[in-house]
Amino acid sequence: MNGSFQAIQISPSVYWVGAIDWALRQFHGYETRRGSTYNAYLVKGDDGYILIDTVKKGFEDELLARIATVCPPDQVRAIISNHAEMDHSGGLPRVLAAIAPDAPVYASPMGVKALAAHFGDAVRALPAKGTLTLLGRTFRVVETRMMHWPDSMWTYDEADRILFTNDAFGMHLAGQARWADEVPADIIEDESARYFANILTIYAPIIAKCCAGYPALGLDPAAICPDHGPCWRGDGIARILSQYAAWSNPERSRKKAVLIYDTMWHSTETMARAIADGIAGTGLPCDVLPLSGTPRSEVARALLDASALIVGTPTLNQGMYPTVADVLCYLKGLKFPIELGAVFGSHGWAPLGTKAAKEALAPMCKTTLDPLDLCYVPTPEGLARCREYGESIAKRIL
């Protein structure tokens, strides 16, 4: 067993025993520029330990090495699986074999089905609902269906007041710091927002209901411990709860535009600059993101605070530019509450790029404007139209 990995105590009876993935740079099409962690937690009971979640396949040695600094691995008597996705359950079969093949695994009723579908007879989970008492410790189980996956649940350790929330309140951020208040605030703000935008936006209506119902749960956590990134304590708990409530609220004020584009011979780029200048002249913030160098996850992060999406594309092979099609496909699945959509672009003999882009964009927006098309290289008159187009977009939002 590798002795270089150590468990980190986060409360009197709870240890972090997860793994750090410094090299991760893509997660389901989402650029994870700062890596990630796969968090697992070891809870001390009267006669042994309970492991909450495991790690992605390939990181089992790190998990087991950290456990071994607290107790012999065979002293782990039970496992609670809050989420069956492979970055948290992939190591489960091997971990079970290392601690005790017959150790009970507990999951939500939907988690039992998911683990069986993943691993067959290698993992036979038991359903956990309501209150779960293990090794003298009492856990409250809260099903949070579709707060990411159907099997998602939270586990609350009543003795140490730790709320284990699987993917909720997490972020993709590799690092040795186990607490959010030990990391620069701007990084925490950016990565937690980026995570919500790219992973959880599609479930915003469900998350909004969960946030509204949270006080009625009667939980009083001293710490919130997610399955990715650092944990929350102190003022950080109220802050992340309020941010989730805000991000999932479709009615909140989002006075910003996001303009994305790609270009072949710089004509669409020139149009984008003029449109953005028209928007800026009204005082409305506008993020301008050239897709030649902007990951799709960056666009999603920008849209979390925006109400308008403006898309620029040239016509290529009777359709929109490939990078534009890629981003629109990605954003469609996330279901952002976009109030206003607009399309523009330069074309040669037929404006089919903007036509295709509007068809893709329209189902994502409450209102979609007619495209602004210019033929070949924009003239001064054409650029004046672009500026006016930007002004008209901004006035609708303001």
Image: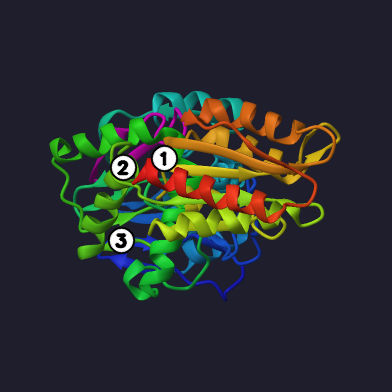
- Residue at 28% x, 43% y is 252
Residue to which mark 2 is pinned: 155
Q: Picture coordinates of residue 31 (x, y %)?
A: 62, 55
Cα–Cα gap, marks 1 and 3: 18 Å
Q: Residues within 10 Å of mark 3 (few under 14, many from 20)?
A: many
Report the span colored magenta.
Answer: 135-154
Q: Picture coordinates of residue 333 (x, y %)?
A: 56, 33
Indicate the amino acid at tag 3: Trp
Q: In this view, does 272 lie to the left or right of 192?
A: right
Q: How crowded is mark 1: few (under 14 residues within 10 Å), some or many (20 or more)?
A: many
Q: Picture coordinates of residue 158 (x, y %)?
A: 19, 48
* Contact flag, marks 1 and 3 (Cβ < 8 Å): no
Q: In this view, does 65 lie to the left or right of 11?
A: right
Taking the magenta stretch, the answer to whether it contains residue 172 is no
Residue to which mark 1 is pinned: 82
State the residue in front, 173 or 159: 173
Q: Picture coordinates of residue 134 (x, y %)?
A: 29, 41
Residue to which mark 3 is pinned: 232
Cα–Cα gap, marks 2 and 3: 15 Å
* Contact flag, marks 2 and 3 (Cβ < 8 Å): no
In front of the other: label 2 or label 3? 3
Q: Which element is circle 3 on?
A: strand
